[in-house]
């Protein structure tokens, strides 16, 4: 596996959209067709846990493909991540739909073949109660070298850490901002001035400015515009 220094050298990301270029880069490295990031949710017992898709590029049929994948391999993936960090590989239904790693086979495990119309590889990540999951790549055919396996597994760990970091920052902001502060930020983000926000919410202009000022401080922003931008990135206003 890559060293710790290698896993922590990337810059801080501001939103989930920043993770897509990283996943696309990983996808291109192995000529995969699609990717998805899954995390385990639920209690610690395997039969009470479930896989939840956090990011994917399945396309227009994403709900169907995602459901098929979880139905085929969800239980196996949940059980595996508690026992092993070896990458999982599987073959598709067609005889030429395969995922192979000839020089690294001893360091991967195989899932039951012929369940899906595509082959693939899943890299397990184990980072604690809310950080366990997989990055998944699928294709008609895969021929992965040991270097590719190690590289993608390291990047998968980094990506999951960044996803956890985003969640933590979002949670902190959610706890800090009140409903009134969020409402004022939303209207300010819509282009309303303080007088219009006050009329809309039935508040005084002074109170509106106080809410916007406190939200700006809580979001560690230098002005109202930056506070609105951060609130959008964290997903609290649109």
Image: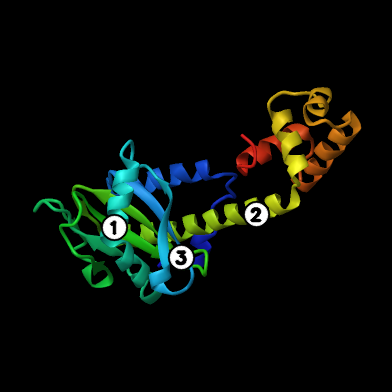
Instruction: Give the residue pinned by disc 1.
Output: 71
Q: Secondary structure at mark 3?
A: loop
- Of the 4 image quadrants, the one containing the N terminus is bottom left
| Quarter of the rendering containing residue 99 | bottom left
Q: Nearer the viewer, residue 63 or 5?
A: 63
Instruction: Give the residue pinned by disc 3.
Output: 132
Q: Position of residue 214 (x, y in %)?
A: 83, 43
Task: Give the foreground label among 2 and 1.
Answer: 1
Q: Most extreme residue toward the left, as rendered?
A: 95
**Which of the two labelled residues, at mark 2 and mark 3, occupies the earlier sequence position?**
3
Instruction: Give the residue pinned by disc 2.
Output: 171
The residues tagged by marks 2 and 1 sit, at their Cα atoms, a distance apart of 30 Å
User: Up-down: is 194 above or below 16?
Assistant: above
The residues tagged by marks 3 and 1 sit, at their Cα atoms, a distance apart of 19 Å
- Of the 4 image quadrants, the one containing the C terminus is top right
**Which of the two labelled residues, at mark 2 and mark 1, occupies the earlier sequence position?**
1
Q: Residue at x 77, y 27 (%)?
A: 200
The residues tagged by marks 2 and 3 sit, at their Cα atoms, a distance apart of 18 Å
Q: Secondary structure at mark 1?
A: helix
| 24 relative to 110 in the view: left or right | right
């Amino acid at each position: 596996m890559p060293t710790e220094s290698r896993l922590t050298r990337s810059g801080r990301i501001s939103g989930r959209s920043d993770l897509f270029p990283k996943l696309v880069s990983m996808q291109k490295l192995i000529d995969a067709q699609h990717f998805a990031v899954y995390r385990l949710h639920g209690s610690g017992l395997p039969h009470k846990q479930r896989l939840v898709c956090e990011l994917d590029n399945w396309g227009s049929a994403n709900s169907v493909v995602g459901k098929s994948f979880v139905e085929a391999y969800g239980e196996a993936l949940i059980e595996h991540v508690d026992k092993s960090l070896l990458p999982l590989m599987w073959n598709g239904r067609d005889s030429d739909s395969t995922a192979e790693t000839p020089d690294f086979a001893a360091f991967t495990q195989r899932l039951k073949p012929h369940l899906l119309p595509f082959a693939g590889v899943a890299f397990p990540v184990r980072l604690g109660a809310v950080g366990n999951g997989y990055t998944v790549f699928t294709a008609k055919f895969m021929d992965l070298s040991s270097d590719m396996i190690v590289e993608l597994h390291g990047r998968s760990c980094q990506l999951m850490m960044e996803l956890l970091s985003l969640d933590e920052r979002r949670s902190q902001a959610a706890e800090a901002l009140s409903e009134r502060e969020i409402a004022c930020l939303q209207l300010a983000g819509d282009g309303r001035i303080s007088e219009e926000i006050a009329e809309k919410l039935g508040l005084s202009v002074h109170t509106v400015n106080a809410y916007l000022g406190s939200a700006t401080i809580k979001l560690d922003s230098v002005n109202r515009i930056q506070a609105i931008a951060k609130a959008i990135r964290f997903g609290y206003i649109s």
